[in-house]
Amino acid sequence: MWPFETGLVPDPTGGRADAIVHAEIWPTWAGPPDPARHPVRDAAQVAGLADHLRTLDDAGELAPLFAPSLDASAAHAVVAEEGWVLGATP
């Protein structure tokens, strides 16, 4: 469970290829859903976000999102109690 169990690190999988990372997301972060993707709005949002995250990963731009630039106090609060939304900026 990112960041509570992994910390704010660029590789929350710890290098394990079989790891699954659970992270809070904002469904419309990748933009409005495309109704042509799926007739159910939530499903279209998830499909669009999955494509966006795949594109970021392919470009080497996904890992830094797991390690946002926060001062030590804020980083401690995020990991200890607050949590973080993947892709949010401080």
Image (cartoon, grey):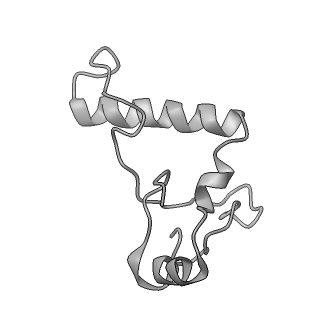
Q: Is residue 71 left or right of residue 90?
A: right
Residue 63: where, in percent of width, then height? 67, 52
Q: How many marks?
A: 0
Q: Is residue 74 left or right of residue 47?
A: right
What residue is drawn where x is 63% and y is 46%? 62
What residue is drawn where x is 61% and y is 74%? 6
Residue 79: where, in percent of width, then height? 51, 79
Residue 42: where, in percent of width, then height? 26, 37
In the picture shown, does residue 35 fall above or below 63? above
In the picture shown, does residue 88 fall above or below 43? below
Residue 57, quarter of the rendered image: top right
Q: Name the outermost residue toward the right.
A: 15
What residue is drawn where x is 44% and y is 65%? 84
Q: Name the outermost residue toward the top.
A: 36
Residue 85: where, in percent of width, then height? 43, 59
What residue is drawn where x is 61% and y is 70%? 8
